[in-house]
Image (spheres, helix red, strand yellow):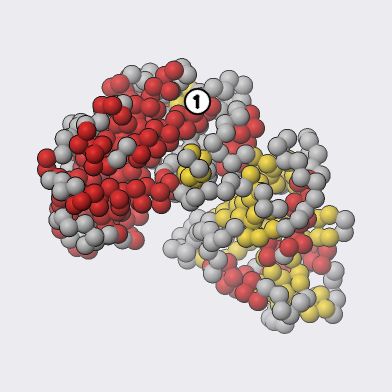
Amino acid sequence: MKPPYEFNIAWENLLDDDSFTEAFLSNVLQDYIVRQRWYGGKSSRLKYIELPEHFRIQQRGEVYYGLLLEVNFEEAFYQHYFLPIAFVSDENFAKKDRILPLKLNGQDGFIIDALNLDAFRKLVFERLITAEPNDTTKVRYHKSSFFTDTEYQSSRFMGVEQSNTSIIMNDKYVIKFFRRIYADKNPDYEMSRFLSEKKGYKNTPAYMGSLSIIDSENANITIALMQELLPNKGDAWDFMLKELDVIFQCLERKGIDVYSLPQIESFKRLQIGDVPPQIIDWAGLNVFLKLQTLAQRTAEMHIALGSEFEDTAFTPEHFNGDYEVWLKNRLLYQFQNRLNTVENNIGRLKGLSAELAKEFLERKNDIRKRFISFDWTKLKGERLRVHGDYHLGQVLVRDEDFYLIDFEGEPESTIRDRKVKQPPLKDVAGIFRSFHYAVYATIFNNEGRYPYKQEELFHAGEILYHYFTGVFLQTYVALIQENNINIGYTQERIFLLEYCMLEKAVYELGYEMNSRPLWAVIPLQGIMSIINNN
């Protein structure tokens, strides 16, 4: 079929018409999909799109369709996406989001992404209001006891997002529609509901409801998650960059010789009273107090995740041989991929980045040995469900407190890998790498602002970073141990932290080499400092 597409069929029966499906899944949809911000296959070549599942999202005769699209690539893999669709006849509507022009029973119109329609968003919200417990239908709406609204008032897009689409409802809630989907419950839904509804963890947006479907193979697929809307002052990444800018400006204002600043060893636990007066005088007390609060919220999350003994998806587990094999296979594959990337792109690097990249390649066997050194029989701590992609951008600043968000897991990982129980120190390692990034990002983003050589700023930044991690670690470990969460003794903790930070830095290296080689110095510095620490 070619445009104009015309069907003598009612909208309610359109998806049953094979000729429509064929026309819809053609180049028209392909061209639309590849332009969307949420489409994650931009670096691959799209081959064709299939429609393995569709379902009705409906109420009182008002019908929309939810499509589960299977996007197949030339590289012999596929991804699944969720796209809700609506038919509109208004010429002035959704000009940018038209997918397909067509005539239905003589009426001209367009198929569009239904999320652009207020009527569709209202319908979903009203279905959540009337959701019944123990729903057994194909399309399932669930609401939390926290959700008490009885009518729809308003909705609007939250703003630009990469991988999902979030809608603010009644100025009180956020519904996140997952675009890339998996044949399983989404970890963000599972973790949000578990932490806020089952464990009463206060420092994450409260779970309010969800929309899921049961597909033809009986898999429970999360389509949308509704949470409380938390007014906030932005994320902790922006907060930290502002703090660090002030701290680096203080170097000149206080006339500090960076090479005279006292240093400490990695992962030394510090009370604020243990931080030398020269460091407090330079950086100020406030940033360390904030780090203690963040450490407390992180520990409380892990305490909630480590205190479950009924739901097997969340019960703590010991290390074992299966976990070790899974971990090593994953990391050695990723490490080889990063080695190839550095070898093929080393000519794009300059200065310290080039030196560190050369050292990285020379020491590849030492790094590989560190990954192989994981021996589960020597570890006494426990594995828990963890955040999995924990960094300063996943933390909201509200009043003087921090709130943890986005439990979807690492974007490169499979849905199964994201649910594997890990040492909770993996999250701590993630936030430590984020501190490291924030220090270097401040230096890179403010070139010429601080009258010191770049090497001097790097030196001062590394010292400050060690005090940040020391203060965070003291608060975190003390609270974790107080609540009987087993993260191992001192040597085990240091081993796991270094191991997880090495893993994280190797993961980051791929992104930096491909996207902004100048910043490759950050993960390379992180990798080499761990390797040279022993």
Q: Residue furthest front?
A: 253
- Up-down relation of residue 157 to residue 248 (above or below): below
Please indicate whether residue 272 sits to the left or right of residue 125 in the image. Answer: left
Task: Give the x, y percent position of residue 113.
Answer: 67, 65
Q: Residue at x 28, y 22 (%)?
A: 491
Q: Give the camera-side residue of 313 and 303.
A: 303
Q: Which residue is mark 1?
A: 303
Quadrant into which the C terminus falls:
top left
Q: Give the camera-side residue of 399 and 238.
A: 399
Quadrant into which the N terminus falls:
bottom right
Task: Give the x, y percent position of residue 64.
Answer: 77, 60
- Up-down relation of residue 327 to residue 106 (above or below): above
Task: Give the x, y percent position of residue 398.
Answer: 51, 44
* Residue 53 in sight: no
What SS does tag 1 mark? Answer: helix
* Residue 200 in sight: yes
Q: Give the camera-side residue of 284 and 315.
A: 284
Task: Bin the neighbour count of mark 1 within 10 Å (Cα to Cα): few under 14, some 14-19, many 20 and up.
Answer: many
Q: Residue at x 23, y 42 (%)?
A: 282
Task: Give the x, y percent position of residue 317.
Answer: 48, 23
Using the rendered view, name the quadrant where residue 432 is placed.
top left
Q: Residue at x 65, y 68 (%)?
A: 25
Using the rendered view, name the quadrant where residue 382 is placed.
top left
Please indicate whether residue 280 sits to the left or right of residue 425 in the image. Answer: left
Q: Residue type at mark 1?
A: Ile
Using the rendered view, name the quadrant where residue 444 is placed.
bottom left
Q: Residue at x 84, y 54 (%)?
A: 59
Please indicate whether residue 354 sits to the left or right of residue 89 in the image. Answer: left
- Up-down relation of residue 240 to residue 199 (above or below): below
